[in-house]
Image (spheres, rainbow, N blue to C red):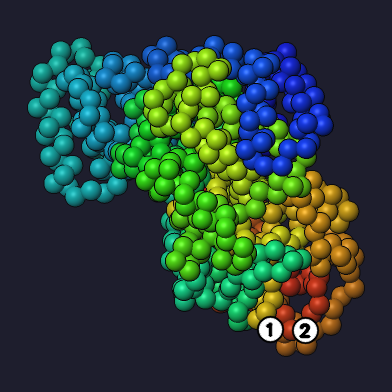
Amino acid sequence: MSELSAADELDEQYQKQYLNFLFEKSSLPEFKNLKTLEDYFYYSLNSLIEEKITFERLENGIPKIKNNTDALMYRNSSFDKYKLPETRDLDEILEDCTKSIAYAEQNTNEFILCYMNRSSALLKSHLYDDCLNDINYIFKNININDSQKVKLLVKKSQCYEILKYPKNDVDYLKNEIKMMITKLKINDKNKINALEYLNNATNNINKKPFKKILVNENEASILNENDKIIGASDSIKISYSNEYGRHIIATRDIKPGEAILLHKPYASYLVENGIYQFCSYCMKQTWSSVPCNHCVHTVYCTDKCRDLAWSEYHDIECKLIGVSSEWGLGERPMLALKMTILAIREAKSIESLEKKLIKLDKIIDPLEKGLTNGIFDSSKYTSVYSLLTDIDKKRSDQIFHYSNVAVILVYLLGTRTNFLGPKIEKKCKDIYNIKNLTFIGKLLLQNCLIVKTNACSIGDYENELDFDERSIGILPSLAIFNHGCFCKTSRYEFNGKISLQSTCTIEKGEQVYVNYGQTFESSPSCQRKQSIELKYNFNCKCNACDDNWPADLSTLPVMSIPDVIAKKLIDVYKLYHTELRADDDDDSAIYFDDTIDRMNIKKQLVDVIEELYPHVRHPSPDLITFMEMLTTILGSRSTRWQTLN
């Protein structure tokens, strides 16, 4: 996402006006002389009110709301796409089905039709458990007529047969269908289809369910918990130096394949292309989601996740998400908003949080910052608040952009919710009437800058150059790890939790790095350093940069290793490629074939990396090859986006 993401989706004329305003104001001497978050916030507030550049747009904007016209449009779109087998995309079809449910006005006939339609699409996509979820949801929550009940009972019975439910359960459903069809007219389409189903005993024999990846969080479990860092292994500690700031050091030798970190982000936010495919609360992929009862921008895998989201933050977020989407704020400001809501609710009140942060600001020792009762706990806002904002290193237009965003968020909170106190009128000057305005403005700006500097992308790594982002999140313990263009760790997601695992031997006393997205294989060191400095405001001094490692390792001279290790490399290489069929274009066996002994392959890779490590110097093509294999195995039971096509 660009630095000016708030203007990304504006019309061309308005975008030009906003960008000109942004650069003109941020280049003025008076702005460059500002020092504090409070100064930046009020400069933006006064400038925006004076220019009337933002609020008119916000006040006149019409956010997307539930309406049956759009619901029908998406439902028809799913029909049209299904009719074209040559270009049929089941992912797009089901996304349209889910959009139609999200947009449909609840307790209307269109809402019923949208749910009925998706249950049919799920059945045709071999997602039988999800089809049952939709059917059960309809029976529990929606009043439908007898014909619709028959149609759903037939689908339910089909799913039971395919999923091999007990025969008694299937027979019970069929008897229920037989009784229900007596209530229908002879020419009722659903009655005719039900009779055809009952008279065809073999129609489901060869159908197989879509196979979902079995996410196994146990494969990322921490063996020995760290008593100072929640969710971390006892193999690391937080250290500090003037050169590196806070960073992570290995307290003992760390074996390849060892879990270093496993923790849920403090807050996360789905990117735009994932909001109808993933649960907005737990971030799991979902095909039978339930919609928010109020907005069209979030869906959830269960009622439980929807209710938890509502009680924790979405009751406030829901009132802002529509207009923020229309104005194009983007995911990062909305993540900052969610962090702010969570922080205030954790502290029980705005006033309590302000007092707490005043105390935290007085802490001088960097190693004491972020601690709760002497422990670094990423589930507490104290740990988030301790993260760097790099305000002294950011360009003035960047800071001004985010101070503008903070003003907009305050305005939306003040005019659309009671979160900050009584609602204010939709007039620019009334923003000054918001109670605790200075503190809230500073807090939102700080959280925006924390997100800009520390948010991590969460998604699937196909390789170091191909990353499919699903969401962004703030995980304070992960943010303390410094970047290395070559690092001995790899990051995964397991059911909403972020896992960091070692892919090579990490020696005691060695700094443990993570990769922020720039690897030494992706581009020359000069380009990487420039890109990293522009995005993260530091000069990368990792070994790959300082020693100018070549991106093409085949140009390096072959390293001499003992014959016995060389033979083992060949054996393990063959084992990996034979077992996982890694040379095939279709690599699905890595994720779906339950006959593969992943633990044995992992053990073999760990052993060969440990034996090879003392005999090579970096960069070693052989070592990196086996590290990449281990990276794949470690992620084979992690959360991944699955396509139905």
Q: Decide: is 414 above or below 620.
A: above
Mark 1: give few (<14), some (14-19) or many (20+) Cα within 10 Å: some
Q: Position of residue 404 (x, y in %)?
A: 64, 29
Q: Decide: is 477 above or below 290.
A: below
Q: Is residue 167 visible?
A: yes
Q: Hey, which quadrant is residue 514 in on the image?
A: bottom right
Q: Position of residue 417 (x, y in %)?
A: 41, 26
Left or right: residue 499 compared with residue 136 = right
Element carrying mark 1 = helix
Residue 438 or residue 20, whichever sits in front: 438
| Disc 1 target residue | 611
Label 1 and label 2: CA atoms lie apart by 8 Å
Q: Decide: is 96 above or below 277.
A: above
At label 2, which amino acid type do we have? His
Residue 380 or residue 612, whichever sits in front: 380
At 77% from the left edge and 84% from the top edge, which residue is drawn?
Answer: 615
At label 1, which amino acid type do we have? Glu
Q: Is residue 118 visible?
A: no
| Disc 2 target residue | 615
Q: Position of residue 426 (x, y in %)?
A: 49, 15
Marks 1 and 2 in Cβ contact (< 8 Å): yes
Element carrying mark 2 = helix
Left or right: residue 11 compared with residue 527 = left
At 51% from the left edge and 51% from the top edge, which residue is drawn?
Answer: 357
At 34% from the left edge and 18% from the top edge, which residue is drawn?
Answer: 105
